[in-house]
Image: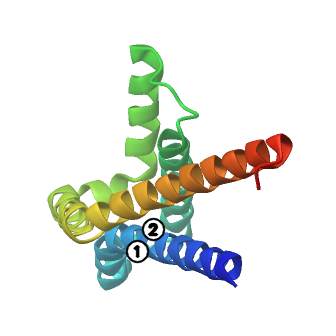
Amino acid sequence: MEANEKKNGKKQLRRRYITLCICSYLVLVGPLLAVLCANRARYFTTVADTVKIGVGGLICLVMVALLIGGKLRVPSALIVLSFVFVMSWLLGNLLEDLMLLSGCALAGKAADWIFFVPHIRRLRERIHIERQATATADAVTAALERTGRV
């Protein structure tokens, strides 16, 4: 019965960790999406504007995912400046409200940093400690079984 309780406890920790990560992401993106929805008549006036913003947003999401995943290193200055130029062209309509959008992004990041990051960090450490404890217990049990002292 004790092993089953441990599995349920690990599953609950894992579920809580995943839920906190999803909420953290929603808090980061929420303010920006709210501003985009509130000003959609101004940003998405034509089909070309909508496509440009969609492509630019998709590129931004891919880049952020790669940076977060550690799969992307910062390349040379030429590539960075080319990327900034292309993104500025694609997201030109949004650049008019850069102060508002960056303020929303800052508010989302601050809320994430205050409400979610400490809890996620503690849960990650707790999950890691429990994994180590389980591995150690399994190793000790295996060693005791080999020596016949169980």
In the picture, the quarter occupied by the C terminus is bottom right
Numbered tag placed on residue 10 in the rendering? none
Look at the picture and state if 70 lies above or below 101. above
Q: Nearer the viewer, residue 40 or 57?
A: 57
Look at the picture and state if 98 lies above or below 142. below
Q: Which amino acid, by three-letter code, is at mark 2?
A: Cys
Q: Tag 1 or tag 2, which sits nearer the N-term?
A: 2
- x%, y% of residue 128? 50, 53
Q: CA distance from mark 2 to mark 1?
A: 9 Å
Q: Nearer the viewer, residue 34 or 136?
A: 136
Other residues around mark 2 within 10 Å, as few (<14) / some (14–19) / many (≥20)? some
Q: Nearer the viewer, residue 31 or 24?
A: 24
Q: Is residue 65 left or right of residue 101?
A: right
Q: Which amino acid, by three-letter code, is at mark 1?
A: Leu
The residue under label 1 is 26
Q: Is residue 41 left or right of residue 103?
A: right
Q: Residue at x 81, y 41 (%)?
A: 147
Q: Residue furthest front?
A: 149
- Mark 2, secondary structure of its residue: helix
Numbered tag placed on residue 21 in the rendering? 2
- x%, y% of residue 111? 21, 69
Q: Residue at x 41, y 64 (%)?
A: 123
